Image (spheres, rainbow, N blue to C red):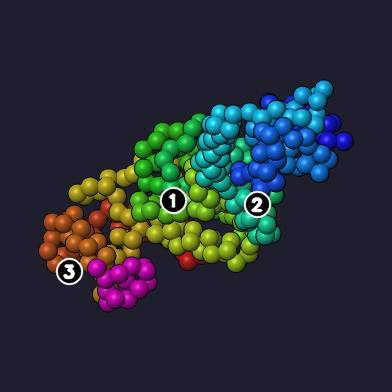
Amino acid sequence: MVALGVTAAARDGADAAPVAAPVLSAAARSLYARVTRGEPVGDADADALRELVAWRLVIVDPDRPRSPIALDPQEAGRRRLDDELRAMADRAARMAAIPDLADELGVHFERAKWRSGSSSEFLAEPEQVDARIGEAISRAETELLTARPRGPRSPELIASTMAREAHALARGVTVRTLCHDSQRDDPATRAWVTTMTAKGSRFRTLAAPFQQCVVVDRRQAFIPDHIVNSSPSHAAWHVVDRALVAFIAEGFADAWRRADIWHGDPLPAAEGGTGLTRRQREILIDTAAGIDQRITARRLRIGLRTLSKELGDLRARWGVTTLAALSYQWALSAERQRMTHDRPEDEPGN
């Protein structure tokens, strides 16, 4: 019956947000005119009557459901306009929140998308990164390569690293660690290197930039994140694709060849300043041997301009102006003797 439907609509329309269309239908407009004339409504008017109730243009007396009472359309229009403005404000607020929501959820989507393959996994939390690296090292069989371009680490991290590497060495795993030159000035790091060198680990330092990584058995690697936007600095990728792991290991090997051997001692001082870098030593060796600079640059994978700058720095270091004088000073230097003494460890492949 129309009475039951209209009465429910009247109750709902008083408290709930409008549910009718923004513009009254022709049937509702016609019915409103009839109501103002006192004409009764029938069952066929049920839909139009619900529109009028929703717009608050009529009210229905439960005792006289077929005789609705017309209300002021000006007041009803103002109320309807207020309702629409509030609804618009709510929609605008929801629209404004969409970009932030998309950014928040986008991080999870990127993780899932890049984890969908079997070759990489994104690790966002430091505990997760540490646990996964620890698990990989505990299963290492032949080789552990670690590049640490960042500054000194906390004593807790050093202790944890020492324990892992000691167990790996005990199983016969070769352990090589590349550090930044600045770490030579940190007492805790020097103590770690001295202790682990005595156990069989090998260390080198490099002043030039290099990429951070951990490579285990050349089968899996851990690298910093360069994909997920706004990821924390400790985020990492666990890579198991053999081709990519081999590429990462070759990058480590290239940096390792250019680095200086380190047994835990502070950075040595030489004539005119600090110790030579591995690249400077290689340049001096080739220069003293009379090797063409283009061959030296190609072998060291640097440009001729970079090679010329290095030679200029070396000439200024010893206060000479010619390559012949530079070669002479190099031959007499303590640096040359120290490099010769350490050369066995520098054979190709190490």
Proximity of marks 2 and 3: CB atoms separated by less than 8 Å: no
Q: Earlier in the sequence, mark 1 or mark 3?
A: 1
Q: Earlier in the sequence, mark 2 or mark 3?
A: 2
Q: Which mark is residue 275?
A: none
C-alpha span from label 1 to label 3: 30 Å
Choose between 166 and 90: the one closer to the eye.
90
Total number of numbered discs in the rendering? 3
Task: Judge whether 271 appears above or below 240 on screen.
Answer: above
Asked which secondary structure carries label 2, the reply is helix
| Residue at image point 43% right, 58% down | 255
In the rendered structure, which amino acid carries the disc numbered 3?
Ala
Between disc 1 and disc 3, the foreground one is 1
Q: Is residue 173 left or right of residue 193?
A: right
| Residue at image point 33% right, 64% down | 282
Q: Is residue 8 visible?
A: no
Asked which secondary structure carries label 3, the reply is helix
Circle 1 residues within 10 Å: few <14, some 14–19, many ≥20: many
Q: Which mark is residue 324?
A: 3
Q: Is residue 266 magenta?
A: no
Circle 3 residues within 10 Å: few <14, some 14–19, many ≥20: few
Pinpoint residue 350: horizontal percent, then vertical percent.
50, 61
| Residue at image point 27% right, 65% down | 306
In the rendered structure, which amino acid carries the disc numbered 1?
Arg
Pinpoint residue 23: horizontal percent, then vertical percent.
61, 45
Q: On the image, numbered disc 1 is attached to which residue?
A: 204
In the rendered structure, which amino acid carries the disc numbered 2?
Ala
Proximity of marks 2 and 1: CB atoms separated by less than 8 Å: no
Pinpoint residue 346: horizontal percent, then vertical percent.
44, 60
Q: On the image, numbered disc 2 is attached to which residue?
A: 112
Q: Is residue 272 left or right of residue 47?
A: left
Task: Judge whether 36 appears above or below 99 on screen.
Answer: above
Q: Which residues are magenta?
A: 292-305
